[in-house]
Amino acid sequence: MAALPANTPLKVGICGATGAVGKEIVGVLETRGFPVKELHLFGSERSSGKVVETKWGKVEIEAFSVQKAREMDVVFISVSGDFSKEYAKAIAEGDDGAVVIDNSSAFRYDKDVALCVPEINADAARKNPNKVIANPNCTTAIGIMALFPLHKRFGLKKVIMSTYQAASGAGQEGMDELRDGAKEVVNSAEGTIAKNKIFAHPLPFNLIPHIDVFQDNLYTKEEMKVTWECRKIMDIPSLPVSCTAVRIPTFRAHAESIVVETEKPIKVDEARDLLAKSPGIALADEPANKKYPMPLTASKKYPVEVGRIRQNIVFGDHGLEFFVCGDQLLRGAALNAVLIAEALAEPVGKDFTPKL
Amino acid sequence: MAALPANTPLKVGICGATGAVGKEIVGVLETRGFPVKELHLFGSERSSGKVVETKWGKVEIEAFSVQKAREMDVVFISVSGDFSKEYAKAIAEGDDGAVVIDNSSAFRYDKDVALCVPEINADAARKNPNKVIANPNCTTAIGIMALFPLHKRFGLKKVIMSTYQAASGAGQEGMDELRDGAKEVVNSAEGTIAKNKIFAHPLPFNLIPHIDVFQDNLYTKEEMKVTWECRKIMDIPSLPVSCTAVRIPTFRAHAESIVVETEKPIKVDEARDLLAKSPGIALADEPANKKYPMPLTASKKYPVEVGRIRQNIVFGDHGLEFFVCGDQLLRGAALNAVLIAEALAEPVGKDFTPKL
């Protein structure tokens, strides 16, 4: 069992505190009013000694050690898969270890590790046989906010997704490369191509249909994560889900074009009403007012925007097509991680429906 | 019947010669070695008198008149739907009228007007009962280069598309707005938002899932064009085709993520071999070498790049998933239009397979 005490100030640690996601976790803890007794920010040797201003006063970046992390009640890890593989279990081990909420893909597909979007499967985390909980891939976390309510009501039979993913998926360096590269292009002669280091190709004014490594089935790992994680989080082990994952030149919000076939007939109005009432969603579905999900409006927001809801032409009265956009660093990482911690302070069996 | 004489220099007119597509038509006529006897560039009053350097010497922009256009052998129109509605039939009418190749959507869905991608249905144009031929929507023209060979071999049963469309779809002004807006953003404080006039929202570092007007079924007209035009060009009147059309911050190449279900079982290698040999396509399908369709590589090229070819998870052995990218101004407009004229100089019944 993984649990945190309710209404009790906690010792909170963040590994990777100076990274793009780590910084956002601090912000989410602040705005969510998370009960922090002590905040420990663990960074690299390079960052050690730097001071971060927080709601709880000035916090100095500490060099990470397993021992220090184990003294926390809860530790958020957002460094790398290798870091998590090396340290997560050691931090969590035993009654005196900390609850670990891990942002990497290191443990997501392990049978004994819960993969959690707390509005969907809080109990999977609460009943987890150990204290390491995995935070899903950003693309999955964003799309599943709309997919799960549709599944509960109409039953998902097929899911076909194409993504429009922001540079932040590659961290602060990815966002910097996009901004610097775009600057180079627009301030130079027409036809100038930006340099690239973080991304496989220059991203400014381009797109790259390649995120993470290619698998034997010719999907990328990023695409397969959507398949694997949708199945695990919604507990539909054989759900047919396909994804094309594409990096586009936006900064920090991922968008997704999604077509579903459902078991039961589905009507647009019914789906829209359902999604409007579902947790974690902000309906953005007023074509006449030019309101639909976009990075411009979804960035730095907690809810995932859902819109362009329509009866899908291909699957007819059993088909729905829609568009979602959510902040990659928030619902896709920091927000979801903090919400897992919040859900762990509630009893098994209780639906988790946070006000965002 | 619409026909042009073979191996005979022709009088060629371009309406909208100073627009983004008009300029590209001049370029395509030049590089394709189109047999031009006289080139007449028709523009607005504002452009009249300007001089354009061409392979055939300096050409002065003339103010448009139906009478002058009727003296041509072939007239390319790329102005607006309203312009085409007002003038196209008058230019083409009667034995002494000109063959008109129209880039607008004014006549695309008329029963007595051929909608032509000449590698696919040259005969539809050649056998057209009148002399107005419609050039398809750019998104359709690009995607259909891969869809049609797959249909001929495997039979298309379902097509699901999501697009990544460039600013050039809104003409030179669209490209300028993207470039100027991006410049404003990267040269200002972080968080600066670009101004917009051509697009419904600022496009730099954003995306807009809204191109053309919304229809009663909540698809946009741009999305329905893909459905209607795929059906008409491939002559599969009831083919289920759905599309989500999204503007992204790229300059002049559209990309498309496409999933198909086929009547016959389809294998990846067979599909790849077929597409490699199909006209108008450049295979870009070497994941290990980071080679896949992208605006960076597809822009200013005649062939449409096709890659990321894989067995689709959802439709299994009857499903294929792939990614295409083609120059919106070329295959999506100017090139296809000039190729229609080339095809009209060949006899009915002859396959049109240009070297690109």
Image (tube, coloured by chain):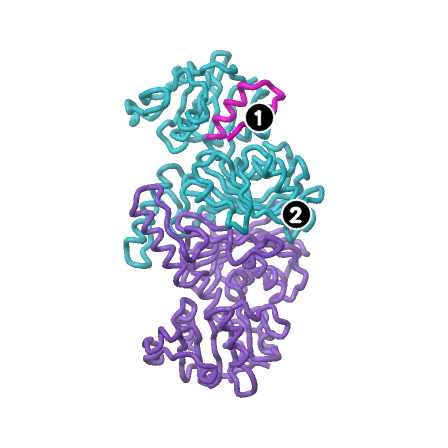
Chain colours: A purple, B cyan
Considering every residue shown, the one lying at the far top of the view is: B96
Q: Is residue B344 magenta?
A: yes
Relative height, residue A117 to residue B144 (above, below): below
- Under mark 2, the amino acid is Gly
Q: Name the residue under label 1.
A: B352
The amino acid at mark 1 is Phe
At which x and y percent is residue B132? 51, 22
Q: Which of A148 and A174 is in front in this view?
A: A174
* Disc number placed over residue B179 in the picture, else none: none
Residue B41 in the image, given as x and y percentages of width and height: 36, 22
Which residue is rendered at x = 39% and y = 59% of the image?
A175
Q: Which chain carries label 1?
A: B
Q: Quadrant of the N terminus of chain B?
A: top right
Q: Where is residue B318 in the image (x, y as percent from the top left)?
A: 69, 46
The relative height of residue B152 versus residue A336 in the rendered view (above or below) is: above
Residue B303, given in percent of the width and then of the height, sits at 51, 35
Residue B89 visible from this viewpoint: yes
As helix, strand or loop, the secondary structure at mark 1 comes to loop
SS for tag 2?
strand
In the image, residue A280 lies in the stretch drawn in magenta? no
- CA distance for labels 2 and 1: 28 Å
Q: Earlier in the sequence, mark 2 or mark 1?
A: 2
Q: Name the residue under label 2.
A: B319
Q: Is residue B225 visible?
A: no
Specify the subunit that label 2 lies on. B
Q: Magenta region: which residues?
A: B335-356
| Mark toward the viewer: 2 or 1 | 1
Look at the picture and state if A349 lies above or below A254.
below
Decide if residue A345 is on the left or right side of residue A228.
left
